[in-house]
């Protein structure tokens, strides 16, 4: 029957079911958007991983598909084949990547500390100023 012929509990049940349906559709739409966003960000990350390792001022040698080494000139951003040096392979390549990752992590952590330490010192000052370190007064 029509909504005017239904009893109030039946109308309430229909209204709740309709709203849950809308809510579910909204969640599905937002989830799809999130999946698309994560996918595009992952693609960006994957395509730029090589750039992270070549973000230093010095040139670095990496393995190419052949046995000739390829060197990135950081100032011009171009790759140059260097037939006089050999390409990194196996454990040497792993060690190089490990050292680069550690170096980048330490640089990033240092930048984080430059920002975080003054903020934490200010926060500690506020705790002391407002006597917030006393649990009986908070």
Image (cartoon, rainbow, N blue to C red):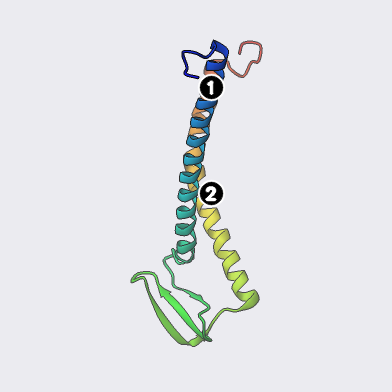
Q: Is residue 78 above or below residue 36?
A: below
| Label 1: few (<14), some (14–19) or many (≥20) C-alpha neighbours in 10 Å | some
Number of marks in the image?
Answer: 2
Q: What is the x, y in percent for residue 113?
A: 52, 43
The C terminus lies in which quarter of the figure?
top right
Q: Is residue 71 above or below residue 43?
A: below
Residue 89 location, x and y as percent? 60, 79
User: Which structural element holds mark 2?
Assistant: helix
Which residue: 62% across, 70% down? Answer: 95
> Residue pushed farthest left?
76
Disc number at residue 72?
none
Packing grade of label 2 (10 A; few <14, some 14-19, many >=20) is few
Give the camera-side residue of 113 and 14.
14
Residue drawn where x is 46% and y is 80% of the image: 70
59 in relation to 6, above or below: below
Residue 126 left/right relative to 94: left
Using the image, determine if residue 32 lies above or below residue 101. Answer: above
Image location of residue 118, percent across then percent down: 48, 35
Proximity of marks 1 and 2: CB atoms separated by less than 8 Å: no
Depth order, front residue of 132/55: 55
Q: Nearer the viewer, residue 3 or 27?
A: 3
Query: Which is nearer the N-term, disc 1 or disc 2?
Result: 1
Residue found at the far bottom of this picture? 84
* Residue at position x 54%, y 28% in the image: 20
Q: Which residue is mark 1?
A: 14
Nearer mark to the viewer, of 1 and 2: 1
Gap between marks 1 and 2 measured at Cα: 55 Å
Point 55% across, 54% down: residue: 106
Q: Look at mark 2 in the image and give the residue it sits on.
A: 109
Asked which secondary structure carries label 1, the reply is helix
């Amino acid at each position: 029957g029509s909504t005017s012929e239904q009893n109030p509990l039946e109308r309430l049940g229909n209204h709740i079911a309709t709203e849950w349906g809308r809510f579910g559709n909204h969640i599905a739409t937002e989830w799809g958007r999130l999946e698309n966003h994560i996918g595009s960000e992952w693609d960006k990350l994957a395509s730029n991983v090589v750039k992270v390792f070549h973000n230093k001022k010095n040139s670095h040698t990496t393995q190419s598909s052949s046995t000739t080494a390829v060197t990135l000139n950081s100032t011009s951003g171009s790759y140059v084949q260097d037939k006089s040096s050999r390409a990194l392979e196996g454990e040497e390549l792993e060690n190089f990547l490990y050292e680069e990752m550690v170096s980048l992590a330490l640089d990033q952590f240092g930048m984080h500390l430059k920002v975080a330490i003054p903020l934490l010192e200010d926060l500690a000052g506020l705790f002391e100023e407002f006597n917030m370190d006393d649990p009986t007064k908070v």
